[in-house]
Amino acid sequence: MSQPQPLIQLPQTAERAPSAGELRFWLDKAVCWGQADGPDARKDASLHLSRLKDFLQQVLTHINNMSSTAETLKRLPLLGQFLGRLCWNPYVTADATGRRLLLQCLWGLYSEHPGNAVERTANQWIRVLCQLATEEDDAQALMKKMDIPPKDYHLEVLRKVSAFFFSALINSVIMLTYTRVVLLPSFQMVALLQKSIGKSCSCLGDTNQRCACDNILATSEACVPLVTCPEAAPLISALLQQQVTCVRAALSEDFLDAVSSAYSSRCLSLEEQAVVSLWCHNLPSLEEAVLRLLDCALTYSGPIPQKQLEQSLLPKACAQHCSIFLVVNDIFRSILKQADGTECVKYFVGAFTGCFLREVALQQHQTSVSLKAMFPQSPQSLLLPLLTRPTEMPQQAWRRHLIWLSSSLQRLTQEEEHGDDNSSRSGRFHTVFEAWFLLVQCSHWVQVAVQLLVTSEPEDCAPLLWLLTFYHHPTNRGHHRALQLVRGKEAWDHLHSLFSVLDPPLPIDLLQSLVTLLSPQPQPPPLSPLLTLNLFVNFAVFLQQSLSASTEIVQMVLDRCGLVDGARWVLSSLQIRMNQGDCLSSDTERVHLRIRALQNTLTHMHVASSPAKE
């Protein structure tokens, strides 16, 4: 019996026609896979499957570019034998893409009006394959009876052939588990396998005893070609959700990689818990899911909707598995450091954490993992105060709570900035970063601070302004935080004076100063324009000024500094917080009306400026 040939590197060319040498290589592979039926042959077929599909795509392109079947077979005389052998290989035909390419190649070789002996022979050969999958002996009579063209008939019957191959492959998987095999319909065989792998471990007390987990690894390896078959989805889900109670229950890495690839490319549909189990088993698939969700958030025109976060399943998976949340948090840390605190990234991290905390609250009776275990690097004194949502305490306590948070964070930063022990300096930097990271995750308190600043008296602003400045400038590069606080207080003074004007005309000097503060500042240390913009939008929404006056200020200022899109984004996030109850307001309906009116104004400004940008 011939053994599988070793995996070799083949030329990866999708445009040129396949060569006779390449066809010979793949024909030898098909012969080898047909003669051998052991684990080595199955593994070899799985390893080569991706490159085989690339080659089939080349063949299909070549067939479509030829003027006739006779010309194709003259150029590649071994093509018929190669495709015929693949038709009988269940590892090829069980794969959705491989099966589709194979059937398309056969369909391309079928001549509706054969012009010579070669084409007539090819048609007869294709009819044989078709008749093997149907009880009709007279294909022509069947086609006439069904009133369908010959090409459509043969393609449809070839699809039935592939169903037979799937059944054969499932039987080969069952042979890994049972010594006596009875051929069953594929859905019954899948159910039988599910029942087998669902058995609990039976060798916890004796490692020499045969265990129900013994065949899980072999079964997962045999299922690699099946991952794109809809019929196999229940079996794949059962394998993923199998409890790992002993070392024998491990899944094949090839299986996990194949499932991850098929799921990410939407060639495989999995139930929710199977997806979560895949992330538990396969770190790259989890990282890909997180980065894909972040990419959606960054390309979205406004704050990412909560529904989209929930549909990703990631917050629920994090609530169910502490290990998943720790990995996701590490990804967020890395992204925040690379993005240098980009506002949309910070908002995404905060929104994700809020969705995660809601899932944790829903599953408290199902999990015993503490929040401290989920946030092991966060300063423990700040953990519960920051994780507590504003809706979980009386509104009258919000200001006092924020003052305490601000003073606690100030103590941490002072220890970092004034410490003399160089050996512990990196540890202090780490502590301050983790405190800031936790503040980003719980940014609802930052937004409450912004709103309270709108209604604060000048003497009450300092702690809230410090918290807001730390959120936007956590590193204190060049020890400029004191000057940034001065500029933040200057921005607050301008805003408070401007939005307190009750009668026209508006002070031009205040308008111009505000435009300057919202524009990029070349001189160090710059104050984040987003800090000022956030204050600006909140003043327009919450201060007791007429809507017409606030709208006029918004139009004049934003038109000059070009931050219309940024203001629309802040308004959208503010509306989301209002809907979640995280805003302090005695007149919710009035606030919603002002937000909608300002959104309409900004939308008109955006539309009016679009042609100029083009």
Image (tube, rainbow, N blue to C red):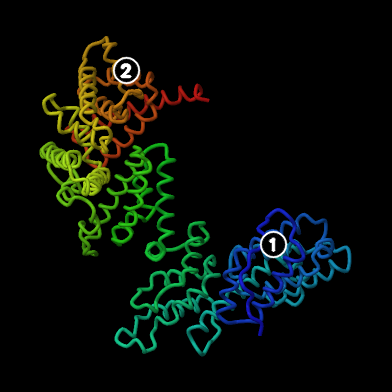
Q: Residues within 10 Å of mark 1 (few under 14, many from 20)?
A: some
**Residue linked to disc 1:** 104
Can residue 389 be seen in the rendering of this structure? yes
| Quarter of the figure with residue 170 | bottom right
Q: Residue at image x 70%, y 74%?
A: 28
Q: Nearer the viewer, residue 328 or 364?
A: 328
Count of marks overlaid on the render: 2
Q: Determine which of the numbered discs, if any, sits on residue 552 in the image.
A: 2
Left or right of 377? Residue 176 is right
- Depth check: give the residue in front, 529 or 418: 418
Label 1 or label 2, whichever comes before in sequence order: 1
Secondary structure of the residue carrying tag 2 is helix
| Left or right: 359 as drawn, with respect to 217 | left
Badge 1 element: helix
Q: Which percent across, then down, holds residue 275?
A: 41, 62
Q: Position of residue 258 (x, y in %)?
A: 51, 65
**366 left or right of 144 in image:** left
Residue 24: x percent and y percent? 74, 70
Q: Amino acid at mark 2?
A: Glu
